[in-house]
């Protein structure tokens, strides 16, 4: 999605380690090190949100995952 939208990729000052669960029940630690600036709004533009740093996590099951750390 980042490439499709033409968003410039930026590097985090410090990589974020995350734990991922794989099918074989083994947990691996990967480091996420890139982000993009993303501005969100509703489909009909009745509301919008300020720009946020969206961390790029490759190979997710969805294009965008919103939530708090």
Image (cartoon, grey):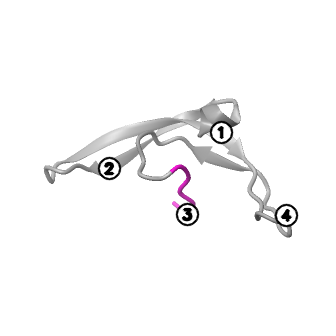
Q: Which residue is mark 2?
A: 19
**Mark 3, other Cα within 10 Å: few <14 / some 14–19 / many ≥20:** few
Tag 2's secondary structure? Answer: strand
Q: Which residue is mark 1?
A: 36
The numbered dot on residue 49 is: none
Q: Farthest residue in the right direction?
A: 46
CB contact under 8 Å: marks 3 and 4: no
Question: What is the C-alpha distance between the residues marked 4 and 2?
Answer: 36 Å
Query: What residue is at 32 percent from the left and 50 percent from the top?
Result: 19
Question: What is the C-alpha distance between the residues marked 1 and 4?
Answer: 21 Å
Q: Quadrant of the N terminus?
A: top right
Q: Which residues are magenta?
A: 63-69
Q: Closer to the N terminus: mark 3 or mark 4?
A: 4
Identify whether 31 is placed above or below 39: above
The numbered dot on residue 67 is: 3
> From the viewer's perspective, is 24 left or right of 4?
left
Tag 4's secondary structure? Answer: loop
Question: What is the C-alpha distance between the residues marked 2 and 3?
Answer: 16 Å
Question: What is the C-alpha distance between the residues marked 3 and 1?
Answer: 16 Å
């Amino acid at each position: 999605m980042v490439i499709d939208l033409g968003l410039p990729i930026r590097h985090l000052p410090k990589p974020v380690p995350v734990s991922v669960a794989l099918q074989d029940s083994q947990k691996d630690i990967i480091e996420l090190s890139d982000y993009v600036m993303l501005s969100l709004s509703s489909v009909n533009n009745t509301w919008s949100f300020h720009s946020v740093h969206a961390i790029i996590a490759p190979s997710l099951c969805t294009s965008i995952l919103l939530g708090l750390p």
